[in-house]
Amino acid sequence: MSDADKPESFGFDFAPEWARKSADEYVSRYQGKNYDERTGREERPRREGGFRDRSPRRDGERGPRPPRRDGEERRGPRPEGTRAPRREGAEGERPRGPRREGGRPFVRREPVKPLDAEIRILPNQKTLGSIIKTLQGTHVAFPVKKFVSMFLDNPQACLVRFEAKPETETRFWSCKCCGLVALSEAELVQHLLSTHLGDFFDISEEPCDPPSGVFPRVAKCTITGEWVGAPNHHSYRHRVAELAAKAGMDERDYLRTLEMHTDAESIEAWKQSVSTQTVYRLKVTEPKPESSSEAETAEPQPAETRPAYSRDQAEAIFRRDILPAQVISAKHVCLPVSLAQTSPSLPLRLLLKYTLRDEQRYPRSLFFALRGAFRHRKFTLFRGNDARGPEFVANMVPSPFTAEHAVREIKAALDYVAAHPLCTRAELLAALKADLPDMDPGLVARQIAFLFQKGHIVEYYNGVLALPETNPKFRKLPEEMRREREAAGVEPTAEAASSDAPAQEGTPEGETTPPVAESSEQVSDTPVKDGAETASPEADAAELPVQEGGSDEAQ
């Protein structure tokens, strides 16, 4: 075959274009260049003093340390035993950090939407009635703040009122059995089923046959130690829901607390634990007989004659016949604080929690409610020392009195309080006993009680006395201040210790003021004149007993 007859002569060369060219062109392009054997890339020019100029390290040998920069401190070698060994996993992976407490993984929850409602803290009427009865039986001035603290320290003595705004769709669902409030009907239904099902059904345990079948594993609760059951048994779902509601947890969170057992002993223990079944029998409300003879002959229907239901059947009957009459829906509700704190609705509990925290700092709602109740009962409210001082409530009206023509016991008491402001009742009685040794102590005490009753002398709860003014003077006793500092956990300073010293004028040195309870005497509120002549308790300042001719001496 001649060269003219070859396929190349007719243009039948199917090789790529780069392969049909001469190889000298490509060889000359890459001559004189260095390539990395590991990466196959061209090596670039190296920088002098750079990292690439260092000699490679050999096994067990360290190369020269790079030069330090200006101002860089030289660190010494790491002490032996301080480096923690690296932990390797089963497949050489570095293990993750420890899980949360209980072994539960972190689950992101939806943010809680704030409750758009008005809330007020109110006093309980029963507790408020006992306070009002106490104030009506005495003429001592008590601080309103003490009563507010008394209510806040006892959640059962406070009421909380929730009121939804008219433009919102928020409604409150309350339970007729216990008064619990929730924000949704589903939460309240769950509360009724878990708490008040026994109020309408007789619950009893009866023996039954243990479950039969093949159960490869059983679940056990790690919180209570109870057997939950086998996942392939028909009662497993209901048992999980029941125990989750009892623990106050979501079913998804409760399933993470279960542990599975596959041994034969555990499976047999579970079968023995469910060898009894819970039976529900509806309670029958018998109609009241009209006559006493019918009441004697009427006998309650025995429980055995009533039909027995399972848990699911009892819940179905409860939802159909009983539940509609036990649920109330309204735009505003009022219930005790201790009961509202157990509500199943998280937004409602958070709103109450933050409101109580604000009331502890500044009791605005409860303070105004108590002031309105005291004014409605015709009590007197006034502030001590100045217009911004502590507020007091008393069953008397502070009114000044001129003792120019009064009997000497009253005049001596008023003069002593004016000369010794903020003295105590014990100090006043001791001074009058010394100034009037010939008078009967009971007579003097009754005259002083008349001044307290009419408000001519203001007596505070701690025994401090003051003359009636627009803002009567007030001070705390050293013992009271010391108790407050101990309750607050504040250490007394040098200035506080010096102020606690008895520096009141008129108190004998080395003697302490007796307690108010020991110095106060049970005396009548009627003033006494010379001898057996007395004045009426309803007498006002103009009808006070005075001496004939205006003399201060006794007849």
Image (spheres, rainbow, N blue to C red):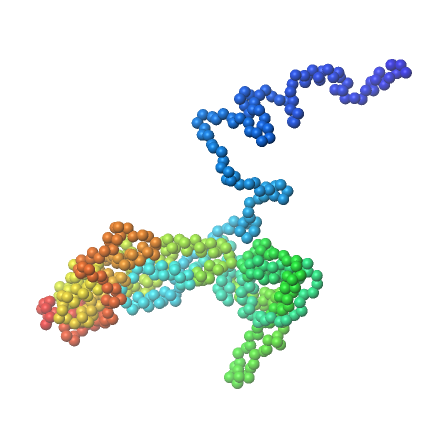
State the count of labels: 0
Residue found 32% across the figure and 56% down from its top = 486
Residue found 20% across the figure and 70% down from its top = 446
Whether residue 193 is visible here, answered yes or no, is yes
Q: Quadrant of residue 392?
A: bottom left
Quadrant (top left/top right/bottom left/bottom right) for the N terminus: top right
Residue 111 position within the rendered picture, expressed as x and y whole percent measured from the top left? 52, 49
Residue 312 position within the rendered picture, expressed as x and y whole percent measured from the top left? 62, 65
> Residue most toward the bottom?
293
- 183 on left or right of 220: left
> In front here: 524 or 49?
49
> In front here: 429 or 406?
429
- 21 on left or right of 133: right
Quadrant (top left/top right/bottom left/bottom right) for the C terminus: bottom left
Residue found 41% across the figure and 56% down from its top = 356
Q: Quadrant of residue 506?
A: bottom left
Whether residue 313 is visible here, answered yes or no, is no
The vertical placement of 555 against 486, above or below, is below
Residue 214 position within the rendered picture, expressed as x and y whole percent measured from the top left? 70, 61
> In front here: 485 or 85?
85
The vertical placement of 287 against 31, above or below, is below
The vertical placement of 50 against 396, above or below, is above
